[in-house]
Structure formats: C-alpha cells, structure tokens
Amino acid sequence: MKKVPFVLVFVVLLLSSFKKADNCALSYNGIYAFKLDEEHSAVLRFYQDGTVLASTSVNDYMDVFSWFHKENKDMVLTGKYKIKKCEIKFEVKGSTGSQSYEGTISGGSLDLKLTDAASKKSVNRIYTFYAL
C-alpha cells in the first residue's frame, strides 16, 4: 500500500517536469514584442539555429514580418542565444550599438533584463509572442 503513494507522487512530478519543459520552449514562427509607447515596440526574433534579431518597429506587427528576418541583418542587431532550462541569454550587435539580454522563458513570454553596452543602463521588459 505504501508503494502506491510513492509511485503516484513520482508520476505527478515527472508529468509536471514535462509541462514545465514545454513552457520553456521558444517559438520560432513569429516575433516577441514589448510595447515602448503608442507607436513603437521593441521586437525580437529567434531562429532554431541559435540566431536572434533585435530591433524597434511600429506597432503594426504584420508589417514587421515583411522585413524582420535574417536576410536584412544589416538593418537590425544580431547575435546568438543560449538556453539552459528556462533561462535565456544573448548579446546582439549592429551599427547602432550592442545590448545584452538575460532572463526567463515562460509560455508565450520572455521576462528579460536588457543592458545597453554603451550607457551600462538596464531595464526589465516582458516580451509577448505574436505568431506570423
């Protein structure tokens, strides 16, 4: 009788770890955006090969999809990301400077601390995913 509760607890823990792992996955078929003001957003795009793009754009996300891709890397900040469990880190660089990001992945959002390399100023942002 005592084995049943132990087995039940083990199964519940095992299933919850799978759910958490699914909750920590990036989505690649769209962008993550943080609304800066009424007209502009900060946007991030991730690729399965480890590439990340960062930029700012108008809030019409359908317009963003037309130009925000690797082929236009001269127009955006680019870098490589690393994921360990639910944590993500990356640095992006481009003609306008460089920024480092670190934070967590949770469902359809990224809770990130962004640090500007030149000013050393940091801000916290929660980016929301928008599918293509």
Image: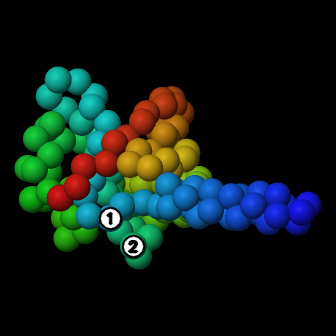
Task: Judge left or right: residue 55 versus residue 64.
Answer: right
Residue situated in front as seen by the camera: 12 or 121: 12
- 119 lies above or below 110: above
**Contact, mark 1 vs mark 2 (Cβ under 8 Å):** yes
Query: Residue at point 49% right, 41% down?
Result: 112
Left or right of residue 51: residue 83: right
Residue drawn at 28 percent across, 28 percent down: 36
Q: Can residue 33 be seen at all in this image of the molecule?
A: yes
Q: Is residue 62 left or right of residue 115?
A: left
Which residue corresponds to the image point at 71% horizontal and 58% vertical from the top-left? 13
Residue in view at x 26 percent, y 64 percent: 29
Which element carries disc 2, helix, strand or loop? loop
Three-letter residue code for mark 2: Gln
Q: Amino acid at mark 1?
A: Tyr
Q: Residues within 10 Å of mark 1 (few under 14, many from 20)?
A: some
Q: Is residue 14 above or below residue 58?
A: below
- Percent across and percent down for residue 66 are 9, 59
Give whichever of 29, 50 is nearer the camera.
Answer: 29
Q: Which residue was labeled with disc 2?
A: 48
Which residue bears the numbered disc 1? 28
